[in-house]
Amino acid sequence: MILYKYMSLGAARKVIDTLSLGFSCLEDLNDPFEGTAFGFKDSGKSTISASIATNACRNRFSRKYGVLSLTRQPLNALMWSHYGDSHQGVVLGFDCDLAGFSDPQSNVIPSQYGEMIYSATKPHKDLPVINDHELMDIGGSLRFDSNTFNLMKRAFLYKSLEWAYEEEVRIVKNIENIPFSYHTGVGRYGEWNKMTVSGRPLYCFDVPESALKEIYLGRHLYRNVTKSNSITDENLKGVLQSWGRKDIKMMQCEPDVHSWSLVARPSINKS
């Protein structure tokens, strides 16, 4: 299965150069309702309210796991506007099997189970309040299996219906036991490299070169030449030509003259 990541030209250059994709914490994603869809029910038998349990679980899940957000569709005009630098960026397509994202042993939520659930209402008062032992298991012994998937799904895979245009698929990994220095906020360990971007941690996971299968160039990619002092016309052509020499399908996005859709044609940057 090939899934896609929208990004700016600068970000795409870094990803292609380093072959590394960034996982973010729940609390750093752009939806303020992330991690609030547990649907705990208040019970007279528990001293913990649904509100307290929700906040505790959200904090625990956010600190122990990293989320990679991908999508099924490389030609979504709204996605290009919102995440592809207003059509001046790039979309990269990755083979999830080759990237290791479909492996249930190394992913808390593998790609084949990571499709988002979009709903007009949240799950409502139908999940027992989590106990202290279960709360402490989050980030520890909690792994992907049928018994824990409902809790994982509530934490990571529910969003409001208004986000449905994104057609998002998530991969979730446990980041708790990666021995980074939390004091410096940077460092490398094995397949991981931790950095700080705009004051927030980003956990970058290395993928094999063979996993990158497709590159889509934005309709207005060359506007980067006029808006940036660091990118010249020749420099951009050189970057695109270096990408074109790779064994990767490279496409140029254009508006279809017969519909409101984007279309993709083979890029000429192959020399």
Image: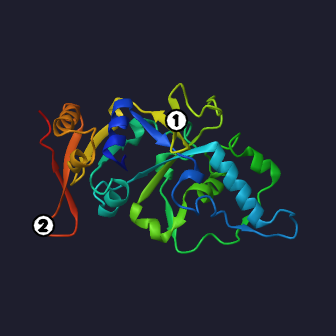
Dot in front, 2 or 1: 1
Closer to the camera in the image, 188 or 99: 188
Q: What residue type is labelled 1?
A: Met
216 relative to 100, above or below: below
Mark number displayed over residue 195: 1
Which quarter of the picture shows residue 45?
Answer: bottom right
Q: In the shown orientation, is residue 37 left or right of residue 11?
A: right
Please report the residue visible at 71 percent of the width from the left and 71 percent of the height from the top.
125
- List x then y, in percent, for residue 79: 35, 59
Tell me if residue 118 comes above or below residue 63 in the rendering. below
Pick the residue in front: 241 or 47: 241
Q: Is mark 2 on a helix, strand or loop?
A: loop
Tag of residue 109: none
User: How far separated are the C-alphas under marks 2 and 1?
Assistant: 43 Å
Q: In which quarter of the image is the C terminus?
A: top left
- Tell which circle, 2 or 1, labels the residue nearer the N-terminal end: 1
Q: Residue at the location (87% across, 70% down)?
A: 44
Callout 1: SS: strand
Q: Residues within 10 Å of mark 1 (few under 14, many from 20)?
A: some
The disc labelled 2 sits on which kind of residue?
A: Val
Q: Which residue is drawn at 63% across and 57% down?
A: 150
Residue position for label 2: 257
Q: Is residue 48 above or below residue 179?
A: below
Label 2: how many Cα within 10 Å (few below 14, some 14–19, many 20+):
few
Task: Give the colouring mode of the picture.
Answer: rainbow
Percent x, y for residue 13?
32, 37
Q: Could you say where residue 178 lies in the image, as x and y percent from the top left?
A: 61, 31
- Residue 59, image x and y in percent? 68, 52
* Contact (Cβ within 8 Å) of mark 2 with mark 1: no
